[in-house]
Image (cartoon, coloured by chain):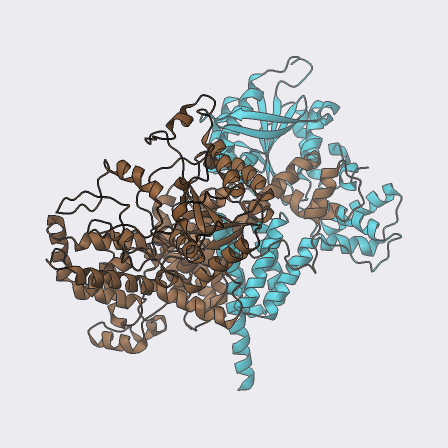
Chain colours: A cyan, B brown
């Protein structure tokens, strides 16, 4: 039994549930027989990957769905062995170069070279190029991105690249200009509701529209998350009731409690407790930047309108440092302390104003 | 101590004929370490001069070669190193804290009375009186000390040579010999000698010298010890010196599991306290001065003694050696040194005093104090616990003292910056970091772990945490890290000191080890594991970790394998109730040298794990909880300041 997310994933461009215009454009693109390098971007859970897989299927037929997971070892010029996992079919290769950390440049060059150097055998019946799918391009180092630029030009004859990322802001200009950029926006709330309803129908369940709406709002229109939530609801209680709690992830609840703890008291001792909670989140695999984002969201909900600009400003400041720095905890804690100081001052000022 | 038996003396004089005494005298008399002064005085310090190598072992481990009987020998001689001449011969003369002595004495008493021996491990920096304590106590309690010394074939053996060369025996390894020694020493009593008198045959086995093989394979030592523990009859004492520079022999030879398994008691010694050391040094120099008839030696004055004392960082043996050396006349080098010393006796005096925080306005001379000590100076080093304490319990000048200084010409801050005014520091943060034998980054981590306890205002914490964040930013780039590391630690420490505007005395606070390394390692491992286990979902890591895994934990979706289920259980679930239980705070033990070694090791291979078990307070150090321990702690820092 697989998850609903995987079970009901559309497999062809024609079956996509939303952004149908874009789907038909992609179809046209493929039907011309050739297409440029693509840069697919958009927020998480919008359906980028689904669209890419549909595109590949359109291109090569059902053969792309026979996936195999491979474990490759690449030897860097410094004789260091880099191990990386790839997902491949006969026609394409998917790799996340940022798994290799600092050595992602080597991965990109070597992998693409090996793929591109082998020609398709039956170029009469098949396309004459293979596709390399690079995920998380925005996390590539600058080195790797420049290497990618050269490689893209060099192997244009035998290979097409599809890059996908959440945002283009960290992708260097030369790459952006060499690719056809396709933005996949989040589905609207109604579209999410529709998807949820149709999935439930296929499962033979009845989803009340109110609950669907609630789920789609709570998921932040992230379709993957919405489907997971919906399935969790099913586990929690069936038949669905209208006012059912939509289960959220543990870490989100935990983060909200942390934010409440920050707001309720501002003292060094409290900061110490908050630090322990941050550590706890980190050991549960929540990346520091996500923690930062979640924390800011919760804190902004809790604080006065006057403070919001300043808090957001400080959050941006420390989030930047988080990216540059080495040890995330310093910056997370510095932000927390900063918020505590700002908030405390604000409350004291407010108290003074009430007194006089 | 004076316990070299007659059997020892024959070979010893022979051996040492071709070793030049270190402090050769003008008279050029021949030198013999076995001659002892009758009026031996004062001092704890390692008793033994070059003790002749003895072969212990397979044939006659209980012969008189290897046991020392209390015995007064030796005419007085000027040429004996002072370290030997002023060996302590009673408990009162030991320069070790009374409680430590008591602790060791109790152990020995308990384990000799019952005839069911035990194992004791003494650790501590070199020259803090470990061996002397054992020797003196054994003498007072009337025990024989039977000591293992590594056999070397270079030694001229006369009588036992033949046995040694016998085929079959010649190839026995040091290891086997050690084992033989241990088991035989345990099993058989010493031979009764005619002149032994009333000496009992209760004995104590002392091992200070470990066969090299043990450093390569500590497991073999453990095997021998296990075997020994089964048939244990007499107390066995191990003495291992700690050193600060990454040599972790005591932890390496005696890991925690072994200590627990074999029920080994462990007592760790501290460096000799400056006050005690001063007492000893003064006593020696006055005794020496009294002996001077011909004025052959110059007598060191108070300032010199204090300098020797502070330069030796608690190593009394080196302090006495330095004292003897500096008292020698007519050495050109020494004259120069005297000149230097005479030039600034006040400075050196003031310097020490400023450290003890009695004279406030001498902080400027802290620089001078770094100008090195002419003779016998050791690199001063701080244990991590104390180094952190120096930063966290920062000491500043008294406001009154500062008023005076301001009057002397330092302009005050303009009014809009007045809130940034702080009294001058009495410590140099950079120096403290340097002496803690750690990289600035790791030191910052320790500070970060502990600083919150010392702050009372959120605003201060805000500033302090920003400085730490700055410090991390400075060292972020690996290319420039070697250069920027110092700046980073400077910003971190000084920022922390400056932002603590309240300066309340907080009393004793336990210090902890940083969690970050562990957390970070765990984070990376978990991420990696997640990607490996759930690769078939074809998700990018972020959405895998933040969306799929937490929901998988909530679903009844059957997993493919056990590992996945376990992982989901561990990582996907997050109990709101459970306050971070998996992050136990590891208390940093005070003045535990092995601790520091471990820490520096951690820092070197922080990429690797640090599972090399953390230890709590050793049994010899009571958990500091009461107010009494608070005083002790303060006292400790005070003492250390003054050296």
In the image shown, does B204 or B498 lie closer to the viewer?
B204
Q: As drawn, is A215 to the left or to the right of B29?
A: right
Q: Residue furthest front?
A: B194
Residue found at x 45% / y 64%: B99
| Residue drawn at the location 44% of the way across and 60% of the way down | B101
Count of labels in the image: 0
The answer to whether any part of residue A157 appears in the image is no
Q: Is residue A152 above or below residue B616?
A: above
Foreground pick, B586 / A55: B586
Q: Nearer the viewer, residue B350 or A39?
A: B350
Task: Residue B74: tell me if it is visible.
Answer: yes
> Which corner quadrant holds the N terminus of chain A?
top right
Left or right of B107? Residue A54 is: right
Q: Is residue A213 left or right of A80 when viewed as pictured? A: right
Residue A77 sits in quarter? top left
Residue B132 screen position, x and y as percent: 38, 53
Q: Residue A226: x, y in percent?
A: 74, 48
The residue at the point 62 percent across, 18 percent down is: A128
Task: Judge left or right: residue B288 versus residue A306.
Answer: left
Residue A194 lies, with reference to residue A10, above or below; the image says below
Q: Nearer the viewer, residue A197 or B44?
A: B44
User: Residue farthest to the bottom?
Assistant: A356
Q: Where's residue A72, x and y in %?
A: 59, 25
| B224 relative to B394, above or below | above
Image location (x, y in percent) of residue B347: 19, 64
Residue drawn 59% across the image and 34% down it: A96
């Amino acid at each position: 039994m697989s998850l609903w997310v995987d079970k009901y994933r559309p497999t062809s461009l024609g079956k996509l549930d939303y952004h149908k215009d874009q789907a038909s454009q992609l179809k046209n693109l493929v039907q011309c027989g050739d297409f440029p390098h693509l840069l697919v971007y958009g927020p998480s859970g919008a359906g980028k990957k689904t669209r890419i897989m549909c595109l590949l299927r359109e291109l090569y037929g059902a053969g792309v769905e026979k996936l195999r997971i491979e474990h490759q070892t690449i030897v860097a010029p410094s004789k260091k062995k880099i191990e990386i996992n790839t997902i491949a079919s006969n026609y394409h290769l998917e790799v996340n170069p940022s798994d290799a950390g600092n050595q992602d440049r080597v991965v990109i060059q070597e992998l693409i070279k090996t793929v591109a150097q082998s020609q398709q055998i039956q170029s009469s019946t098949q396309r004459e190029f293979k596709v390399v799918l690079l995920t998380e391009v925005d996390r590539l180092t600058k080195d790797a991105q420049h290497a990618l630029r050269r490689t893209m030009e060099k192997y244009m004859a035998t290979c097409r690249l599809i890059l996908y990322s959440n945002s283009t802001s960290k992708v260097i200009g030369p790459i952006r200009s060499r690719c056809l950029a396709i933005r996949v926006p989040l589905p609207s709330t109604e579209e999410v509701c529709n998807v949820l309803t149709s999935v439930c129908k296929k499962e033979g369940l009845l989803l009340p529209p109110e609950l669907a709406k609630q789920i789609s709002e709570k998921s932040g229109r992230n379709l993957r998350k919405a489907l997971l939530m919906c399935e969790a609801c099913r586990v929690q209680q069936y038949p669905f009731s209208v006012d059912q709690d939509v289960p959220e992830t543990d870490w989100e609840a935990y983060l909200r409690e942390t934010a409440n703890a920050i707001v309720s008291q501002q003292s060094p001792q409290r900061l110490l407790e908050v630090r322990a909670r941050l550590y706890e989140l980190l050991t549960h695999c929540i990346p520091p930047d996500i923690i930062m984002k979640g924390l800011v969201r919760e804190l902004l909900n809790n604080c006065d309108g006057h403070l919001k600009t300043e808090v957001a400003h400080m959050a941006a400041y420390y989030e930047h440092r988080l990216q540059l720095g080495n040890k995330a905890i310093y910056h997370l804690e510095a932000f927390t302390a900063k918020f505590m100081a700002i908030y405390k001052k604000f409350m004291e000022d407010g108290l003074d104003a009430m007194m006089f | 101590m004076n316990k070299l038996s007659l059997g020892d003396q024959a070979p010893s004089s022979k051996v040492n004929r071709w070793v030049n005494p270190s402090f050769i005298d003008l008279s050029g008399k021949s030198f013999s370490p076995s001659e002892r002064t009758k009026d031996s005085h004062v001092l704890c310090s390692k008793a033994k001069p070059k003790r002749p190598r003895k072969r212990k072992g397979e044939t006659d481990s209980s012969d008189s070669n290897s046991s020392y009987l209390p015995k007064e020998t030796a005419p007085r001689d000027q040429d004996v190193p002072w370290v030997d001449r002023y060996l302590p011969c009673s408990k009162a003369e030991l320069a070790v804290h009374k409680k430590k002595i008591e602790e060791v004495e109790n152990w020995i008493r308990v384990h000799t009375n019952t005839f069911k021996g035990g194992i004791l491990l003494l650790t501590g920096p070199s020259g803090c009186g470990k061996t002397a304590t054992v020797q003196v106590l054994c003498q007072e309690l009337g025990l024989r000390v039977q000591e293992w010394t590594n056999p070397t074939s270079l030694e001229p053996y006369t009588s036992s040579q033949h046995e040694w060369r016998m085929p079959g025996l010649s190839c026995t390894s040091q290891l086997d010999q050690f084992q033989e020694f241990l088991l035989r020493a345990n099993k058989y009593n010493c031979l009764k000698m005619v002149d032994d008198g009333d000496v009992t045959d209760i004995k104590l086995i002392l091992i200070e010298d470990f066969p090299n093989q043990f450093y390569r394979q500590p497991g073999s030592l453990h095997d021998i010890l296990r075997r020994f523990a089964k048939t244990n009859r007499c107390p066995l004492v191990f003495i291992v010196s700690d050193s600060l520079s990454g040599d972790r022999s005591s932890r390496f030879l005696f890991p925690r599991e072994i200590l627990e398994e074999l029920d080994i008691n462990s007592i760790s010694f501290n460096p000799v306290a400056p006050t005690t050391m001063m007492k000893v040094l003064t006593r020696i120099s006055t005794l020496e001065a009294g002996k001077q008839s011909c004025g052959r030696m110059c007598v060191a004055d108070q300032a010199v003694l204090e300098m020797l004392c502070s330069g030796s960082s608690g190593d009394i043996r080196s302090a006495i050696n330095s004292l003897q050396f500096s008292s020698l006349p007519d050495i050109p080098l020494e004259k120069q040194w005297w000149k230097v010393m005479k030039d600034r006796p006040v400075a050196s005096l003031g310097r020490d005093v400023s450290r003890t925080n009695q004279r406030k306005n001498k902080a400027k001379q802290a620089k001078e104090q770094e100008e090195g000590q002419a003779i016998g100076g050791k690199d001063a080093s701080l244990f991590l616990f104390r180094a952190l304490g120096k930063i966290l319990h920062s000491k500043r000048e008294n406001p009154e003292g500062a008023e005076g200084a301001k009057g002397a010409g330092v302009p005050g801050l303009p009014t809009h910056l007045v809130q940034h005014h702080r009294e001058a520091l009495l410590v140099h943060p950079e120096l403290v970091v340097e002496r803690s034998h750690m990289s600035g980054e790791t030191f910052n981590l320790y500070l970060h772990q502990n600083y919150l306890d010392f702050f009372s205002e959120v605003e201060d914490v805000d500033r302090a945490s920003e400085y730490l964040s700055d410090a991390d930013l400075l060292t972020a780039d690996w290319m420039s890290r070697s250069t920027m590391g110092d700046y980073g630690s400077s910003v971190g420490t000084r920022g922390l000191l400056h932002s603590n505007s309240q300066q309340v005395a907080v009393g004793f606070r336990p210090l902890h080890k940083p969690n970050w390394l562990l957390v970070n390692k765990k984070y990376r491992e978990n991420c990696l594991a997640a990607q490996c286990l759930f690769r078939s979902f074809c998700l990018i890591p972020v959405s895998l970790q933040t969306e799929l895994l937490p929901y998988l934990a909530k679903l009844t979706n059957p997993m493919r394998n056990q590992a996945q289920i376990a992982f989901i259980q561990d990582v996907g679930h997050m109990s709101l109730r459970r306050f971070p239980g998996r992050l136990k705070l590891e208390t940093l033990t005070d003045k535990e040298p092995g601790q520091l070694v471990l820490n520096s090791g951690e820092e070197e291979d922080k990429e690797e794990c640090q599972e090399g078990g953390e230890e709590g307070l050793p049994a010899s150090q009571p958990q500091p909880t009461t107010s009494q321990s608070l005083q002790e702690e303060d006292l400790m820092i005070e003492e250390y300041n003054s050296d």
